[in-house]
Image: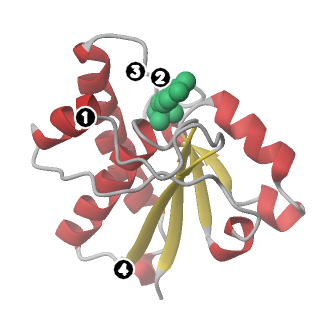
Amino acid sequence: MTTKILMVCLGNICRSPTAEAALRHAAAEAGVDVEVDSAGTAAYHVGEPADPRMVDAASGVGMALTSVARQVADADFADFDLIVAMDRSNLEELRRRAPDEAALAKLRLLRDFTDEPGTDVPDPYYGGPEGFAEVVRIVRDGARGILASLPAGSR
Ligand code: 4NP
């Protein structure tokens, strides 16, 4: 069975597009059946491709970022099996928007799948190149953790 996973950040141009690509790559490598998408809680960058600084950092590890930014939609809470927030502020916003208990139960923080649970994927937008490299490192780690958490039937 295909597991549908949505990666969520604020703008959907830096962290969540990278997390989307990292999970897709890791799943393909491991032969795990997932469908991955990403979205932002805010609408500032809707329709835009990933930030060129993020594209550069991701290409350094062979990941192409192909997403076009969109905002989280009400239908996402039903359509996806797992909704993964990049930071605690994104998670709070998703909790606020979740229509019911079933939707709330689908929400997670990316770093809860790493050895630093409860912490954020830091927003790289206003910082230097090291921040973008750090995002790549963290979301690849998180992608491995997410795959390992899936039920054996999907692996
Ligand atoms: P993202 O990064 O949430 O990882 O896509 C950001 C993108 C844009 C803004 C902030 C963070 N912004 O303020 O426009």
Q: Earlier in the sequence, mark 2 or mark 4?
A: 4
**Residue 120 visible at all:** no
Assess mark 4: CB under 8 A from ligand 1? no
CA–CA distance in space, label 1 to label 3:
12 Å
Mark 4 sits on what residue?
33
Relative placement, left or right, of 22 versus 142 is left
- Mark 4 or mark 1: which is in front? 1
- Mark 2 or mark 4: which is in front? 2
Circles 3 and 2: CB atoms closer than 8 Å: yes
| Residue 110 in picture, x, y percent from top left | 51, 42
CA–CA distance in space, label 2 to label 4:
29 Å
Mark 2 sits on what residue?
123
Relative placement, left or right, of 93 versus 132 is right
CA–CA distance in space, label 1 to label 2:
15 Å
Q: Earlier in the sequence, mark 3 or mark 4?
A: 4
Relative placement, left or right, of 102 versus 75 is right
| Residue 54 in picture, x, y percent from top left | 28, 34
Amino acid at the residue labelled 2: Asp
Amino acid at the residue labelled 1: Pro
Circles 1 and 3: CB atoms closer than 8 Å: no
Residue at image position (77%, 64%) is: 74
Mark 1 sits on what residue?
52
Mark 3 sits on what residue?
124
Circles 1 and 2: CB atoms closer than 8 Å: no
Assess mark 2: CB under 8 A from ligand 1? yes
| Secondary element at image label 1 | helix
